[in-house]
Image (cartoon, helix red, strand yellow):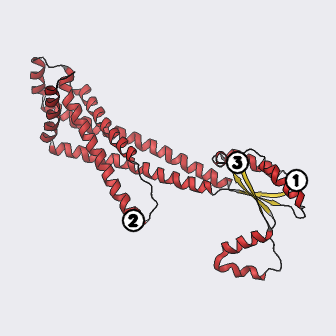
Amino acid sequence: MYGATQMRYLVREAFLGLARRRISGSVAVLIMGSALLMLALFSIITINLDAILQSLRGNVDAEAFLEEGLEEGQRQNLQQELLSLDGVDAVYFISPKQAIEEFRRDLGEDASLLDVLDENPLPASFRIRLAKDVIHDADRMEELLGVIGRFPGVDEVVSQVDLIRHLDHLGRVFVIVDLVVGLLVLISAIFVISNTVRLTVEERARSIDIMKQVGATNWFIRMPFLLSGALQGALAGALAMGLLMIAHRVLQNEVGGVYFFGPGQIVGFIVLSTLLGAVGSATALRRHLRI
């Protein structure tokens, strides 16, 4: 373990190294910050898309239209049988009168078109609220609706299973995009920090040789470079997160309802950026500092 004096020296050397390389260090922070900004941006898009998808899933239900002439007792028995199915949370009876009134509300200003009808053409139905685990699985949802459609007294089942499949596809696409962008950011961040530290190592080759001759350990020589890279990573992460926070506030005022990272996620992102900077430094040291 290093003493307090040694730690102060190492930290001072890390900051002095950044000060000596103001231009190259600033460029490295900007480039790495831009890459991290892309990662954070795609993550935010994914978070908001997932929130939208979950909201849409919450509105997904099914409707079982009933055959004409179904007696009250048969209807009640059918409702109980549907309720007993695994994956069905609730079953609500919608009478033809309720159905036409809902349709009238949906039409809004065009509701007067229904006045030309001599009779109500809409059948009675059961509106079925599905369990959360069902609406997250399009195949299971389709299987359950097939079972409901085979019940005596059920004429037709209408659902949004195609919407669920589309939502699942969108979710998978954005997860893949996040992974690809994350990998590219990881590689680019390590590359940028690595090259910046490599230049510093070459500039300080003589000083490093002197330190080795007076007995400095390998880790003692490496530590200022690692701290410098970690600091650059932290600055790049903070820069990316700061720009994204400003953009979020502007967008929130204009649109509203836009999700952002929580405090823990922000801290985690900056910690990740710090680690990327340290890894970039370690990569440069391994390749260019033969100690």
Determine whether, in the image, residue 195 is placed left or right of residue 163. Answer: left
Locate residue 137, reporting x and y percent: 65, 45
Q: Residue at x 79, y 62 (%)?
A: 125
Q: Could you say whether the residue bearing mark 1 is in a helix, strand or loop?
A: loop
Kindly identify which residue carries mark 2. 253
In contact (CB < 8 Å): disc 3 and disc 1? no
In this rendering, does residue 32 appear at all? no
Q: Quadrant of the N terminus?
A: top left
Kindly identify which residue carries mark 1. 152
Which circle's residue, 1 or 2, is located before the other in the chain?
A: 1
Of the residues shown, which amino acid type is indicated by label 3?
Met
Determine whether, in the image, residue 136 is placed left or right of residue 77. Answer: left
Kindly identify which residue carries mark 3. 141
In this rendering, does residue 7 appear at all? yes
Of the residues shown, which amino acid type is indicated by label 2?
Asn
Dot 1: few (<14), some (14–19), or many (≥20) neighbours within 10 Å?
few
Q: Could you say whether the residue bearing mark 2 is in a helix, strand or loop?
A: helix
Locate residue 43, reporting x and y percent: 43, 48
Of the residues shown, which amino acid type is indicated by label 1?
Pro
Q: Height in image: 222 above or below 252?
A: above
Quadrant hosting residue 182: top left
Q: Could you say whether the residue bearing mark 3 is in a helix, strand or loop?
A: helix
Q: Height in image: 26 above or below 59?
A: above
Locate residue 285, reporting x and y percent: 24, 28
Q: Residue at x 44, y 63 (%)?
A: 256
Q: Residue at x 59, y 48 (%)?
A: 168
Q: Quadrant of the C terminus?
A: top left
